[in-house]
Image (spheres, rainbow, N blue to C red):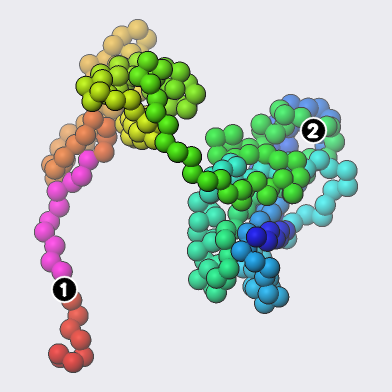
Amino acid sequence: MTLLQFRGARALSDFRLDKLLAQLQRAQAGVRALTAEYRHFVELRSAPAPADEALLARLLAYGAPPAAPQPGATLYLVVPRIGTVSPWSSKATDIARNCGLAGLGRIERGIAYYVRGGKRDARLAALLHDRMTESVVASFDDAQGLFRHVPPRPLAQVALGTLEEANAHLGLALSTDEIVYLRDAYGALRRDPTDAELTMFAQANSEHCRHKIFNADWIVDGEKKERSLCSRAARCSPTPITPPSSRGASCVASIRGPTACTRRARSARTR
């Protein structure tokens, strides 16, 4: 496996840089300047031919040229969260392969922040990245962790009596009633759940997918409203144009539409 790096364009506008610099200065008074540029990391299955490397350089040359490096600045390299594949990477990798780079493993992109003044500080790193989707490393070599290949772990059984501990350890964010439901359901099945099953259940019943909090009681100034916020959103159109064919507990619904016909072009032989 071969890893290549390509310096990229400016990552942020002057407006965004000024706004971010002000936040950094509030966290650490010694900070004086900030620049940001993209950095591309390319995983190849073998050493590239000169033509392939030139093609990669052309594909990754876009945007405004980066600012000149600041001497003495501290590097905060923000990359996609280690162990994940970013949406940008999926699209960029597909494009590069369609351009003939068959030996390409993956392309990832990070943002190199150069902070001049002050000293390395976890508070600054926290302001420069989203910890849910990104990681911060201190050098370009550390970005190799993006391409660490880990073999799949075997399924693990989770004892029903330890669901609360698994909820915290795996970060499932299950509510108390969901844990009770799981304990009853798997008790009836006479077996313990696997960690994969618990993760899928947590995702399907997450706030993002189910809007559980939206459908909770809506209390304003101590007064409980007749309808929840979710039901109010569902009733924002009192006279829907077409009735929904189905509706779940969340705001997702499919709408019954007109029947469409499909036409196929005849081949030249049958015209």
Q: Quadrant of the C terminus?
A: bottom left
Front in this rendered view, residue 198 or 87:
198
Q: Is mark 2 on a helix, strand or loop?
A: loop
Q: Earlier in the sequence, mark 2 or mark 1?
A: 2
For the residue carrying disc 1, how many other residues have a C-alpha within 10 Å: few (<14), some (14-19), or many (20+)? few
In reply to whether residue 262 is colored magenta, the answer given is yes
Q: Position of residue 70 (x, y in %)?
A: 84, 48
Q: Where is residue 88 in the image (x, y as percent from the top left)?
A: 53, 54
**Residue lying at 76% horizontally and 45% vertically, measured from the top left:** 139
| Above-or-below relation of 3 to 187 | below
| Above-or-below relation of 264 to 60 | below
Q: Which residue lies furthest to the top in this view?
A: 222
For the residue carrying disc 2, how many other residues have a C-alpha within 10 Å: few (<14), some (14-19), or many (20+)? some
Front in this rendered view, residue 218 or 208:
208
Residue, disc 1: 263
Q: Image quarter for residue 193?
A: top left
- Main secondary structure found in the magenta portion: loop
Q: Position of residue 6 (x, y in %)?
A: 71, 60
**Residue lying at 45% horizontally and 38% vertically, measured from the top left:** 154
**Mark 2: amino acid:** Arg
**Residue lying at 71% horizontally and 52% vertically, measured from the top left:** 37
Q: Quadrant of the N terminus?
A: bottom right
Q: Image quarter for residue 192?
A: top left
Q: Residue 109 bears which disc, if any?
A: none
**Mark 1: amino acid:** Arg
Left or right: where does residue 201 sit relative to residue 235?
Answer: right
Which residues, given as a range, are shown in magenta? 253-263
Residue, disc 2: 120
Q: What element carries label 1?
A: loop
Q: Which of marks 2 and 1 is in front?
A: 2
| Above-or-below relation of 6 to 209 | below
In reply to whether residue 73 is colored magenta, the answer given is no
